[in-house]
Image (tube, rainbow, N blue to C red):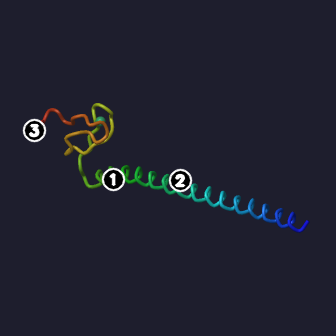
Amino acid sequence: MIILCIMIVFSYMYNQIILLVLSAISLLVNAIMMLIIMSIDMFRRDKILDIEALKKQGLTIISCKECGKENVLEDIFCIFCGDRLGEENEQI
Ligand SMILES: [Zn+2]
């Protein structure tokens, strides 16, 4: 009888520990996912802010003929699709 009671208590504790570990793992996974999403979001925001900062500096922004996205006039190739920019003043 006592042994059975001890076994029940042990199994209960074991279940509790498994639940605790599972919740801890899910929490950890959630935290990692949040970090990844936040870093991707920051990276995207950085790229947008970079173009805005370049515009404020007075650099000429031209749109790519191929994909229509903004590039600095000094760039030779589009940073988004790799197409050549400004074909009229080609250099070597
Ligand atoms: Zn392009």
In x, y percent, where is residue 32?
52, 57
Query: How many residues crowd around disc 3 within 10 Å: few (fewer than 14), some, or many (20 or more)?
Result: few
Amino acid type at circle 2 is Met
Query: How many residues crowd around disc 1 within 10 Å: few (fewer than 14), some, or many (20 or more)?
Result: few
Residue that numbered label 3 is attached to: 91
In x, y percent, where is residue 50?
33, 53
The secondary element bearing badge 2 is classed as helix
Task: Say which residue appears at 65% left-offset and 61% top-offset.
Answer: 21
Q: Residue furthest top?
A: 66
Amino acid type at circle 1 is Asp
- The numbered disc on residue 4 is none
Cβ atoms at labels 1 and 2 below 8 Å apart: no
Q: Nearer the viewer, residue 26 or 44?
A: 26
- C-alpha span from label 2 to label 3: 46 Å
Residue that numbered label 1 is attached to: 50
- C-alpha span from label 3 to label 1: 26 Å
Q: Is residue 74 above or below residue 38?
A: above
The secondary element bearing badge 3 is classed as loop
Nearest to the eye among marks 1 and 2: give it. Answer: 2
Mark 2 CB near ligand 1 (8 Å cut): no
In x, y percent, where is residue 27?
61, 58
Q: Picture quarter containing residue 31?
A: bottom right
Task: Say which residue appears at 69% left-offset and 62% top-offset.
Answer: 20
Name which of mark 3 and mark 1 comes first in the sequence.
Answer: 1
87 left or right of 71 in image = left
92 left or right of 47 in image = left
Q: Nearer the viewer, residue 82 or 51?
A: 82
Task: Say which residue appears at 69% left-offset and 59% top-offset.
Answer: 18
Q: Nearer the viewer, residue 54 or 18?
A: 18
Amino acid type at circle 3 is Gln
Cβ atoms at labels 2 and 3 below 8 Å apart: no
Q: Picture quarter containing residue 1?
A: bottom right
